[in-house]
Image (cartoon, rainbow, N blue to C red):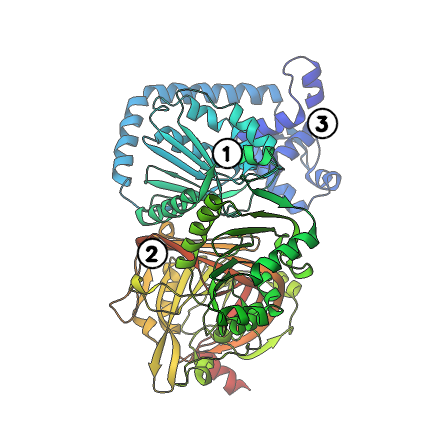
Amino acid sequence: MIKSITTIQESGYVELSEEEIKKLLKNSGLTKKEAEVYIFLAKHEALKAPEIATLKKMDRAQVFRILKNLQTKGFVELTLEFPSRYTIVPFEHILDSIINNKREEVISIEKTKQDLVNYLKNKRSTESSLEKFVVIKSNKKIYSKIKQMIRDTEHQLSAITTVRSLIHAYQFDVFDVAFHHPLKSQIQFRFLTELSEQNLKAVKSVLAQTPKTGFNLKVRNPDLGLKLFPRLITRDNKEVLFYTTKGTDKPEVDEVCLWTNSKSLVQTFNAVFEDFWRNSTNIQTKIEEIENGKLEPKTYVVSEITATRVKYDNIMRSADKEIIVMTSSEGLNKYKESLPLLETLVNKGVSVKIMAPIVNKNFDIAEKLSKICTVRHIPLNYTETAIIDGKHFFQFKSPPLEQEKRELIPRFENSIYTDDFEYVKKMKKSLDTMWNNAFAPSTIPLESILDLSPKPNITNVPVDGILPHLKKMPGGVADRMKVGKVTEKEILNKILTAQKSPVIPSKDISRAYGSIAGAVIHPPKDFNLPDNLVIHVYHMEKQSALGEEDAIVIYLLRKTPIGHVYMPVAIVGNNPNAHRFWKLQMAGSPAEHNVQLVEKDELQIRIHGKTLFAGWTVNIPLLPPQHSLPPACLLIEGYGDIKTVTYTTPVPSGYNTFWEINVFRAFVTFFHPSSKYSGPGTEGFFARDFISTSYPPSAQNEKRQNS
């Protein structure tokens, strides 16, 4: 009779809980299911495979596979009777085997220690010049990487983080590595985090554990209340690690990071950090401001809604020089009722500047405002702020994004006001910097190019034939668009049940499954890049006919015999099997001769929830050839309700592609390294789920003949 786990524990051989035993078994090479079956079998007499399947409520075929694996690995044995029954190898024998194996591993490593050290040193020196991406999953691995970055730091370690991430870092002993660094007194540790009344106690607790001497730590709070994302860590201008997940209050919930040593991308994120750092306040000053119930002398919180509204309106009407406003995408809509006042102020000589994320839903009001004052596009996530005549500063408490459509913006409750000259001057400098980096909204939003919904009423569009021919955009514009033909669930079910079916791209119908995102980018003029860059990024899942792939397609407005048309001019992908397919599909367009195959660690597209990140470490030549898009990043954040759409895209090569997508509108942030720039795209979409069915010309001819 076999000893069960319970009798093993009662015998005093080993005192382990079932979870500890399960963990030990998994560390010994078993999968989770194999460990569960082993423990189940240990609690019973010898059993036949069908009996185990019945008692465990598992599929019989799965149980047979698991038992075969356990037998191969030496964890279970078969009886000689027929049909055979399965019994476990006693747990104490398993433990002895594990201990012996570990001892042998240690002895082997000790014998080859120096050889391993020399080999790894040579390998590191060889690979140090390679620029690559590494995806890091699970908090254990992420914090292990952060610890290694701290150990390798020689001069400076900088981080944009949240308070809860700082607390998690303490829980994973990350700060202990910094506190005991041999160069800790020479290294600059800089952290940007957003302080509030709610997390004040937690921040003070973290700071209290920091050594008072011999440790150079500086912590600041962003002045304009930026919601800190992406969270990132940079080291010595050599490497950067940034999160692609939004973060959670629970340290046990695993997150995902991307690490890169690409010089251009590290330079980009360093520039982002330095911009935030310049426009921030020492954390101790911010703590004192919150504890004293005010931000600065002459600064106070106005909790009474009516009083704030009256004060704001009166100061606005009395403006005689300049009004500069930063608001949210929904907040811009409130200016409908302010159009007469703004027109009066502008006629009086007042300069009115308004910044907001300009998207399809507020494009109409942005266009109307542009006829009166100056409107520019900024990224999502800034707190609503207004400065009047360089003397009066208002900051309004904004609701969460998902509540914006239901609440009046700005919310006048608990607003901040100050007329302190030095403070207003400092805040105005920050807003002026943002204004200089922002730009006017596009006259051709992405949705009019992609035709994902009815077009807004667009004016000031060039009249040289662009709009009539937008539907002829190869590989990107919908023909016979239909909304709601299939449901979101139906598309998801098709993706989940899809089976890979290898194809010959020139002959066979091929299907791809995955996610797509797109954006319109308007680089500043000094970037030496064309305006109105349309970028599509594709993340193909492994069940796609040509396999897993990340790819980028770039479109530019080109003059053609039928007028100005958005044409694909460059394609970058990391799947050799798909390389020929891209050339075939894009035949007849400039991209046919500009398909670039890269390594997987040179192009990464990661998706989490409604957020997509795309980054590349290679130069992408564009056509005309004098232009080239350097290593860069895109952050695309979906918002609002999902829409299910189906459409067909015919292209000059003769291919027809039928698309089924679940799509969000999206905010876009573009990181451009060579100019140390980060700024918003004007419009974006994020198709979280897509199925594309591509019909080559031969398949279409056969279909017509059969019909």
Question: Image point 65% across, 57% down: which residue?
Answer: 310
Calculate the distance from the C-alpha at mark 2 to the C-alpha at mark 1: 48 Å
Calculate the distance from the C-alpha at mark 3 to the C-alpha at mark 2: 53 Å
**Camera-nearest residue between 237 and 298:** 298
Q: Quadrant of the C terminus?
A: bottom right
Which residue does the numbered mark 1 point to in the structure image? 285
Which residue does the numbered mark 3 point to in the structure image? 43
Task: Give the mark nearest the N terminus, 2 or 1.
Answer: 1
Question: Which amino acid type corresponds to the residue marked 2 in the rendered image?
Answer: Val
Q: Is residue 496 visible?
A: no
**Camera-nearest residue between 351 and 635:** 351
Question: Which amino acid type corresponds to the residue marked 1 in the rendered image?
Answer: Thr
Question: Image point 53% across, 24% down: which residue?
Answer: 208
Task: Give the mark nearest the N terminus, 1 or 3.
Answer: 3
Which residue does the numbered mark 2 point to in the structure image? 598
> In the image, is 110 to the left or to the right of 48?
left
